[in-house]
Every structure is written in C-alpha cells, then in structure tokens.
Image: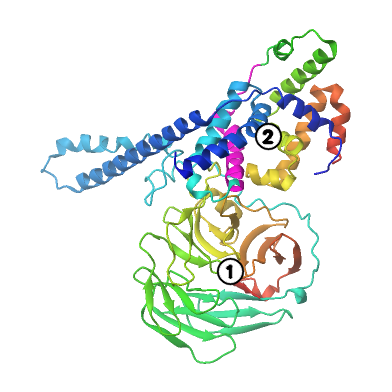
Amino acid sequence: MDARDAEYADFVRSQTRALLRSAYLLTGDQHLAEDLVQEALARTHRAWDRLEHAEHATAYARKVMYHAQVSVWRRRRVAEILPGTILERHGGHTDDLAEAAAQRVMLRRALLALSPKQRAVVVLRFFEDRTEAEAAQLLGVSVSTVKTQCARALERLRHLLPGLRTLADTEARR
Amino acid sequence: MTAGPNPLRDALGGLADDVEDADLYGGALRRSRRIAHQRAAAGTFSALAALGLVCGGLWSLAPPGGHGRSGGATVVAEPAPITPAPQQSASAPPSPTPPPSAKIHTPPRRQPHPARPGTATPRSRSLADLPGRVFYDQQGAQPRVVRLDSEGDTQTVLTAPHTTLGISSDGNRIAYVQNGALLVTATDGGAPEQPYAGKVSGDEAPAWSPDGSRLLVGSADPAVLDVADGTLEALPSALAGKHFRWSGDGSKLVYATDSCQLKVAGTNPDASAATVPAVTVPVLGDPDEADNPSGLGACRPVSVDETGSRVSVQLRPGDKAASAAATDGTVAMAVVDTATGSTDVLPIFGVVIGAVFDARGDLLVRAVHEGKTTLSLFSPDGTLLVQAPEPSRLRQLELVAYTN
C-alpha cells in the first residue's frame, strides 16, 4: 500500500462512523446507509488526488453523500419501517428501553415521511448542527430554500410526532 | 448554531446510535474501480457516437452514384448510435470535446448562484468607505476604461481601442491587446509601451503577476512574459487551458479547460512557469450528475483570492442556470471554493453580475436587484465591509478589477 492508499484508508477509517450516522438518518436503514456512504467514499476516492487536505476530503464526501441522497436515483431508496424492528434489536422487554426504542421508531418513520431534501435539511441543521448557509452550500441550494424546506419539515414532524411538538417549536425559534 | 440542550438533536442522535459500524474500505475501492470503468466505457461510446456522426456526415456528402442512393437509407440509419446519449449525458467523463448530444439533453438546472436575502449588515453603506479602486471596461464605439476611486469619483484611464485588458494588482498599470499587439500603460497617464514585439491573442486577457513583473498572455500557447526584458516563456504543455489567473500571493495559477472545468496549478517562485501537475476543482464541469447535479461549469476564471482557495468565475454560457441568473445580456458569476467545488452563498440581494478579488483576498461583488446595482465588499473572512449603490453612470460598463 503506497502513501496515497494509506492516507485514503486512514480517511475511510476515521470518517465512516460519522458518515454512517448521518446516512442512517437519511435512509432509515443500515444497508441503504452503507450503500450511500460507500458511494460517497468511492467518489471521494476517484477525486482523492484533487483533494489536498483531509478536511477537503471530508467536505467532499459529505457533499457527495447528500447530493446522492437527494438525486433522482436515490429518491425511492428509503427503508420500509417494520413495527418493532428496533424494539426487537433492544430486546423489547425493559419498559424504559422499550419506550425509548418506540420513540425512535416513530421518529424514524416520521423522518422517512419527509421528502429527501427536507430530511437532508433536518439532518444537517439539527443533527450535524450546520448553519443555514452551510446547509445551503452542501446541498447546492439557496439559503431561502433551506429555510423553506426546514419550516415545512418541522411542520410535518409536528403533525407526525405530536409528542415532539415542544422540541419542534423550540427548534423553529432557533 | 446554539449550544446547550437540544431535544431534536438528542432524538436524532439517539436514532443515529442505532446504526452499526461497517468496514466500507474494500467496498468503496471496488465501487471506485467500477465508476472508473463505467466512465471509460462511456467515453469510448461517446467517441464512437461522434465517429458515427462524422462518418454519417461524410457519407451524406458523397456524390450520388458512388455507394449509390440505395445506401441512403442505411446512411440515415447510421447516426442512430447517437440516440442513446441521454443516458450517458449524466455519466460521460470530462473530455475536451463533449458528445454532440450532451447539451441537448442537459437536465434542468438550479440557479447557479444562490443569492440569499440580505442577512449581513454592512459596516458602511457609503461608497466613500470603499478602500480600493474599481475598474470598469466599456467596449464598442467609444472604448474606455474607467476607474472608480474611493471618493466615489470616476476617471477615464484608457481611451485606446482594445480587445481585452488586465489591471495590475496595485491598480497602477493596464496591459491591453490592440490589433494583436500587447501594450502597457500607466493608469495615471503616459504613452503606452510594447513590452513584447510578437502577436498575442485578443481572446486572453493579460494577467499580471502579483508583483507586476510578469504578464501571462495568450501567444501561440499560454506563456509568461517578463515585462522588463520582453522574454517570453511558454507554460508547460501539461497546463492545457485558457484564461490563466494568478492567486494574490502568486503561489497558484487557476485556469479553465475547454470542458469548463477549473484547474489549479502550483507555481515555482524561482521561475516564471507553473509547476505541474495541476489539480482539477471538483464538481464544476463534471458531466456526472451524481457529482454535479446542477450541471455547473466554469469556462472563465475572473480572479483568484490571495491563496488560490477561492476563485470568481463566469458560469458556462448556455446553461439554464447561467441563463436564468443572467439578465440584460450580462454573464452570471459565482465564487467557487477550489478545494470542494462549492459555490459561495453570499448574503446579498439580486443577481451577481460581477465578482473580483483583490490581491489580499477582499471580494468585491456587483449585483443587480430590481434595476439597481450595488457594490458589496467582503473581507476574506466573509465580513461585509461596505455595501453601497453603484453610480448609475457605470451601469453599462463591465466590472474588470478591484485593487487595493
């Protein structure tokens, strides 16, 4: 393995977990998230010689991942939620754990009810803590589009998750 | 973003915790190789398609009788390989000569420069606080170069006919091309000098090195001219491109390719020529829709910031994105991050019709909104220093440089 390959391997090792976490929120499925991240990493590998610094590679990989998620060929590639999927993963027998897991199922289902772009905006703004300008830059849209998509996404989340009304209201005021 | 308790972030974080770790290194490499193979195959197909078109054209020029009109039906059918081009337009590799059908099947584009509603408050709204000097060009029957000084006054600094020009980074000299001759004159008057006896291209604006000692010009090939002694040194042949621009510190050269990609090459401080290899700015000009969903291309870099990390560019003419943004025949502009290919989102109203860096990296943006033109000056960290209306007498002129 030459130095270039070693650098890329280090990059993959250091970034995969973080990318997978965002990709999981975007797709709602382990395998689809892996597909998405693998695609982003592969395209980053193609561009590796042009990306001088690690932060450039990270920014590039994220940009590719979000673009791939909202592009046409990915639009229907989201998970089908099976009730109890996550409950089963956590055993489904402890009340608090079961409650938390049930909430995650509902949140996951609500996220998948959003449009790909709305979901991407929510993940960028409220999971990755990106500013509106940063989210706009990553998605290649205007800031006003980010604001619009964000407002619509929060409205839909409020409707789908009445129990999360408080947090959505909180976020809307930020 | 604000810190502290954030219920939605916590909920999303909890959900994200459900994802399991995976080793994607091997899969990513295999996928990378498949992408390379697909691009190579698409490139081969494009070449065959183009060849088919050429052969079809030649065939149709053949005189009646030769292969016979009876073959005419076959001739008509020959260009058929062109028709699948819509599928390849999204994945064809960058090439100096795009497939003939690429533009026909260009997917809808978004606005190339997502100007957002004004959210930044300028430190000053007075043109008098603009620290540098702005240069404008007017072509046509009465060619002239006009300088807007910090006091808001305008002064004509060149009236000689010219096809293109370049302003030195200190704003004191103009290099211009007149009937293929390269001429240099001071902006405060004086007779022009001809530092190079040969012909230069009128399509390539002369680009001053930051120290003002050299000019990058289009001769037979792009070349660097020593202004003092008139020696011309061609750029390395590997730097195949046009519209070369120096970064403010002189460490980088940015230029465009025929396929509207941008490239960045490092320079050797001890020599006039750039070092190779150049690296390609991602996204721009990339025909792959997954990497470049907006189909952005940059055919002409205008100016580069101090370090070569950002460049102002004219967007590719003919793109719907550029056409949608451009008004009154102006050319849509964008500021691009050369590391990622991202376009900057500038906190200004309207359509950006001009954007130029000075050698220190300050960015002057010219935008039109509801018929009014404004100038906005940003520091390298994005602070909006000045935003003021542009004098209406400059409206029909083209912004060419900002010097400080």
- Does the magenta run of residues contain B37? no
- Does the magenta run of residues contain A64? yes
Asked whether the viewer can see residue B139, the reply is no
**Does residue B275 sit above or below B145 in this rendering?**
above
The reply to whether callout 2 and callout 1 are in contact (CB within 8 Å) is no
For the record, the magenta segment spans A55-80
At mark 2, the secondary structure is helix
Front in this rendered view, residue B389 or A16: A16
Query: Is the residue marked by circle 2 packed among few (<14), some (14-19), or many (20+) residues within 10 Å?
Result: many
In the picture as drawn, the residue positioned furthest to the top comes out as: A93
Query: Where is mark 1, residue-wise?
Result: B248
The percent coordinates of residue A72 (x first, y second) are 56, 32
Quarter of the C terminus of chain B within the rendering: bottom right
B268 lies left or right of A120: left
Query: Where is mark 2, residue-wise?
Result: A120
Front in this rendered view, residue B218 or A92: A92
The residue positioned 72% from the left and 51% from the top of the image is B116
B261 lies left or right of B354: left
